[in-house]
Image (tube, rainbow, N blue to C red):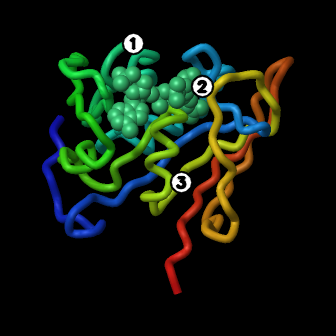
Amino acid sequence: MTFPPRARTGTARQPALAVIAAVASNGVIGRNGELPWRLPDDLRHFRELTTGHAIIMGRRTWDSLARALPRRQNIVVSRQAGFRAEGAIVVASLADALERVEFPEPAFCIGGAEIYRLALPMAQTAYITEIARAFEGDATFARLDPAQWDVVKREHHRLDAPDGFDYDFMTYRRRSAA
Ligand SMILES: NC(=O)c1ccc[n+]([C@@H]2O[C@H](COP(=O)([O-])OP(=O)(O)OC[C@H]3O[C@@H](n4cnc5c(N)ncnc54)[C@H](OP(=O)(O)O)[C@@H]3O)[C@@H](O)[C@H]2O)c1
């Protein structure tokens, strides 16, 4: 299945950018290079949103994946000259990543912590799975500033398991400058 390039609604120079992340109540997103939780419903949600689009990720997040994610344009950001990632394009900066996007908008920044920090100021939309439980970890995501972001959708769920927890699929849109 191929996804042809199409007209961009972002700026003339770059495609619209969305950030997608799952975040614990204490801001944690990762531990030892992995997700700290097992939440299959969130993986399904991630797949549904990102399929058919470009996914931009840091090299460490790439390392955490077993392989390139199918039916998506995989783009890996790394400072290492000559880094190779099978099934993905490797670029040296987020700006280069956006330049290389060919799949339909939005392009998704899928993490991790370092790349989210670069991408968030440029993103128009943020899809955040807000997990109502704290987890230990070493990678974090900054809380979205309510002065800059509006909630446009909230979908509540609960992981039905002995150690289950509540979580919300949130969609935030950046407030347009008045
Ligand atoms: N909960 C979630 O939604 C979610 C999503 C994704 C990832 N995660 C978790 O987040 C953790 C990984 O995050 P992380 O912050 O350690 O790593 P990361 O953001 O995935 O990748 C960091 C790497 O990206 C490259 N990089 C960073 N800034 C760059 C720049 N300005 N220019 C060029 N390359 C740059 C560097 O690669 P080189 O070292 O190759 O130069 C750097 O080591 C893992 O635990 C993962 O499971 C969680």
Q: How many marks?
A: 3
Tell which circle, 2 or 1, labels the residue nearer the N-terminal end. 2
Tell which circle, 2 or 3, labels the residue nearer the N-terminal end. 2
Judged from the image, the secondary structure of the residue bearing numbered disc 3 is strand
Give the amino acid type for the residue marked by disc 2 in the picture. Pro
Can you tell which mark lies on residue 40? Answer: 2
Which residue has dot 3 on it? 126
Give the camera-side residue of 18 and 157.
18
Q: Is residue 102 left or right of residue 172?
A: left
Judged from the image, the secondary structure of the residue bearing numbered disc 1 is loop
Residue at horizontal 48%, vertical 48%?
A: 19
Query: How far is the residue under mark 2 from the one under mark 3?
Result: 20 Å
Which image quadrant is residue 115 in?
top left
Tell which circle, 3 or 1, labels the residue nearer the N-terminal end. 1
Which residue has dot 1 on it? 66
Q: In this view, does 137 lie to the left or right of 60?
A: right
Nearer to us of marks 2 and 3 is 3
Residue 149 seen in the current view:
yes
Can you tell which mark lies on residue 171? Answer: none
Give the camera-side residue of 41 and 95.
95
Residue at horizontal 77%, vertical 25%?
A: 135
Q: Position of residue 18 (x, y in %)?
A: 44, 53
Give the amino acid type for the residue marked by disc 3 in the picture. Ala
Residue 57 seen in the current view:
no
